[in-house]
Image (tube, rainbow, N blue to C red):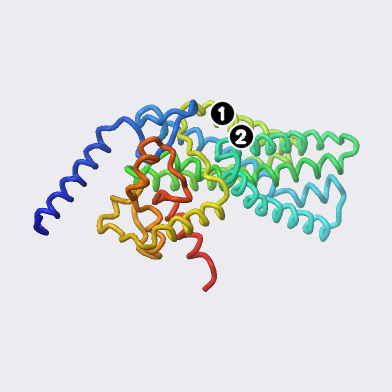
Amino acid sequence: MSLQEEANENLLQVEEENLHKDITPYTSDGSIDFKGRRALKHQTGNWRASSFILITELGVSLSYFAISRNLVVYLKNELHEESVVAAAHVSAWQGTYFLATLVGAYVADSHWGNYLTITCFCSVFSIGMIVLTLSTFELSPQYIFSFVGIYMVALGGGAMKPCLSAFGANQFDGTNPMAKGSFFSWYYMCIKIGNLIAVLIIVPLQDIYGWPLEFGIPAFLLLLGLLSFLIGTKFYRYHKHGGSALIRLCQVAVAAMRKRNLDLPKDNSLLYEATGKHNPKLRCLDKAAIVSDSDFPSISTNTSNPWMICTVSQIEESKVILCLLPV
């Protein structure tokens, strides 16, 4: 076969694959619906599903900023702390909030997945807001109630923060990158709108109506955000969590080592589950996605061993991790 004929054959194969992607009713990223079935393009995901997530983010952002903007004043006026002590407590609270993002990301990636992580920690966030609101009625002991509430807010809000944006992006597969970019624009707009409403409307309420309304309104709006998230359950696209990122990295390394003597195909689309853009760096790891003759039986029955063959997305994830390491 001449080079021209081979090129024409490869071009025809790519065109057939693209046509198949347009015709197939299923998503191209292997996502599933809430019943565990392959997700349908027109019944799950996209803007219908992501709109519920945006509403949730609006409630989360408004609640967080409503507390953070006025927490020093609350500790000074209601709990009678000195300015230095109150500022130190707020700094520790904010540090806990951002440290909790690492906890949430690990739990979502290794154990629960984004949906369950968001649901559980948003519930913790909501309970913390309710406890904090009740503490403004001078329940005894008020000091303990207040700190239990604000640290539940820090744990719940921080842990769900990285999962919410990732889960929203998962509602769009690789065939619609423009929509995914638009989602992030709307996502960060919701953060800014929540901040604006908190500063201009919620925080000034404290001077007029007192602390119960200052914390009560954000608590109510957060509960509405959680309810919105739960209502969208049947419309979401879900991705099975792949376990620990370190284990997935080791799987790529082992699979690439096993196939070190095989040659990479010139066409990256021939690699195992090749979708989206391909990173040309660390090409040696791409050998983990080479489909050999021994892999066909397990792939056909969907029982492939990740220590023998890895998907391109898993390899790309490993490349990102390795590129973050100091040189």
Q: Is residue 96 above or below residue 303?
A: below
Residue at 59 percent across and 28 percent down: it is 227
Task: Please identify the quarter of the rendering in which residue 134 is found.
Answer: top right
- Position of 300 with respect to 203 (left or right) is left
Element class at badge 2:
helix
Considering every residue shown, the one lying at the far front of the view is 294
Tell me the quarter of the image containing the N terminus.
Answer: bottom left
Asked if the residues shown at circle 1 and circle 2 are in contact, with their CB atoms under 8 angstroms apart, the answer is: yes
The amino acid type found where label 1 is placed reads Leu
Q: Pick the residue in front: 154 or 319.
A: 319
Element class at badge 1:
helix
Residue at 40 percent across and 31 percent down: it is 39
Question: Is there any visible trace of residue 161 in the rendered image?
Answer: yes
| Disc 1 packing (10 Å; few <14; some 14–19; many ≥20) | some
Query: According to the image, label 2 marks what residue?
Result: 119
Question: Is there any visible trace of residue 275 in the rendered image?
Answer: no
Provide residue 211's location: percent of width, then percent of height. 76, 39
Q: Is residue 40 above or below residue 105?
A: above
N-terminal of the pair, mark 1 or mark 2, is 2
Per the rendering, the mark at residue 40 is none
- Position of 179 with respect to 36 (left or right) is left
Q: Is residue 313 above or below residue 167?
A: below
Q: Pick the residue in front: 146 or 173.
A: 173
Residue at 77 percent across and 50 percent down: it is 73
Query: According to the image, label 1 marks what residue?
Result: 230
Provide residue 309's location: percent of width, then percent of height. 42, 50
Q: Is residue 41 above or below residue 2?
A: above
The amino acid type found where label 2 is placed reads Thr
Provide residue 181's location: percent of width, then percent of height. 39, 48
Considering every residue shown, the one lying at the far bottom of the view is 327
Considering every residue shown, the one lying at the far right of the view is 140
Q: Pick the residue in front: 76 or 13.
A: 13
